[in-house]
Image (cartoon, rainbow, N blue to C red):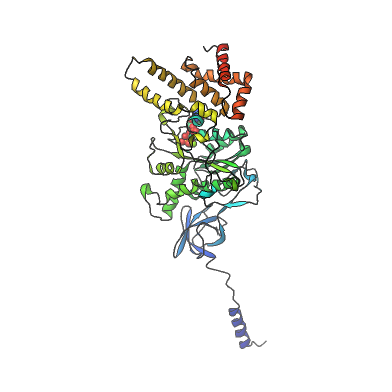
Amino acid sequence: MAINAQEISALIKQQIENFQPNFDVTETGVVTYIGDGIARAHGLDNAMSGELLIFENGSYGMAQNLEANDIGIIILGDFTDIREGDSIRRTGKIMEVPVGDALIGRVVDPLGRPVDGLGAIETDKSRPVEAPAPGVMERQSVTEPMQTGWKAIDALVPIGRGQRELVIGDRQTGKTTIAIDAILNQKGQDMICIYVAIGQKESTVRTQVETLRQYGALDYTIVVTASASQPSPLLYLAPYAGVAMAEEFMYNGKHVLIVYDDLSKQAVAYRELSLLLRRPPGREAFPGDVFYLHSRLLERSAKVSDELGGGSITALPFIETQAGDISAYIATNVISITDGQIFLSDSLFNAGVRPAIDAGSSVSRVGGSAQIKAMKKVAGTLRIDLASYRELEAFTKFGSDLDAATQAKLNRGRRTVEVLKQPVHKPLPVEKQVVILYALTHGYLDSVPVDDIVRFEDELHDYFDAHHEELLETIRVTKDLPDEEVLDAAIAEFKNQSNFK
Ligand SMILES: Nc1ncnc2c1ncn2[C@@H]1O[C@H](COP(=O)(O)OP(=O)(O)OP(=O)(O)O)[C@@H](O)[C@H]1O
Ligand SMILES: [Mg+2]
């Protein structure tokens, strides 16, 4: 068979003309560098900041540094089998996580994938992990209380729905316990809770999940976890994933409590990936935008206006300090962003004052508007009394003969400290808190030996449960004190029939 040269060249020409490159440098790139949890890629000229990218091995990445020749990427998954020269694709989507009711009761990673072995999460809704915070006009001020069930918090540093209250303290001072019990106390309060565990041991997270399950709190809680063994990009992402899930509920008029345990570890993870991405280090080697890391997160907690449904996100961010130093870089940043802080003191904790809340250094800037009327009446001066007791106590260590007034103050102070102690996983409903604080501030405890206060309180609650449910009911419903004569009579009656005189 004769081959016609012209025919062949025509065919080749036609092939060349019709050649469709299936390789688009703006949509697909090449990995040029791969390091611990980060990569750089050439190409991808159109990639957006925060865009989700897919590596050849199926792992996801998130575009971070957009530079002239290449982009820096944080890898959100397994990176051991990604090689230089691998291809990487754009998705055109900003990083999103699944949201909605289907997540309630589940334990998920920062990408919203289940890690509790209970099967797939069926939801068709998702939200971007980075979203703008509600603006000034979309908010309203905090008015409803968010009861934590801790006497020392609800009385001294009350938290309102939509508030951001920092919990700060050294390691092992009871920080996590504060959050877990606050979640337990939301049972039946029409709240959804999200516990974001950042950089904790997997065994610790597991214990917390079990506690929540045991007390029936998992029915209204989502746990987002990026444990210590995960690559730093996931630790960095976890709080944003959590707040995205929270926003879905808030914008549907619901109330959410979100706990970030803890943001110190998130900041460290962010420092690690920033250094790997070769961003310039600043103070304590954190990158310059570490303030923005936390401010853009915490600003997303809000009480939104009635037009937007009136939902709220209450945030409890945690910071771990070293030797009680609240003036460290990250600590001062977060203090300045939040609406107050609860300072947990190592020395109080070790002295057996638990929860170890240091009343002098703790404050809630939303304050009274987040307390019910009854609580405001009984706890009004408690904080100042307690602080002055601490001063007096230190001062009177040197002298022995005290006048009666000072002696009385010291007596009351000691009993106040005792009443504010609370064991783990025993959140107290607000009406019971009011009763015991009423008894305290009206002097019913002054004659009870300090060592018997705990027993006194337990028996008082039991007595009210059995004989004065109507008084508890009144406080619960009217949110105000019942007729004080009736309340006084009930407490006196309890004291008479008991062996506390
Ligand atoms: N109110 C309390 N009464 C008695 N024990 C408590 C109380 N609060 C916490 N604890 C105990 O103190 C220990 C430390 O508590 P927790 O884990 O909450 O502290 P943490 O500050 O979160 O610690 P870490 O720094 O390790 O995260 C736990 O064993 C806990 O049971
Ligand atoms: Mg902890």
Q: Quadrant of residue 161?
A: top right
Residue depicted at x 40% and y 52%: 288
Q: Residue furthest right?
A: 1
Q: Quadrant of the N terminus?
A: bottom right
How far across and down, in percent of the image, does residue 333 sit? Answer: 41, 44
Observer-nearest residue: 479 or 397? 479
Q: Is 364 left, or right, of 16 in this rendering? A: left
Observer-nearest residue: 298 or 373? 373
Q: Is 332 left, or right, of 102 in this rendering? A: left
Tell me if residue 114 can be seen. no
How far across and down, in percent of the image, does residue 433 sit? Answer: 54, 26
How far across and down, in percent of the image, does residue 271 sit? Answer: 42, 49
In this view, 152 is above or below 290 = above
Residue depicted at x 55% and y 68%: 24
How many numbered markers are drawn? 0
Q: Quadrant of residue 4?
A: bottom right
How far across and down, in percent of the image, does residue 327 sit? Answer: 37, 40
Tell me if residue 387 can be seen. yes
In this view, 376 is above or below 453 = below
Q: Quadrant of residue 408?
A: top left
Observer-nearest residue: 438 or 243? 438
Observer-nearest residue: 485 or 185? 485
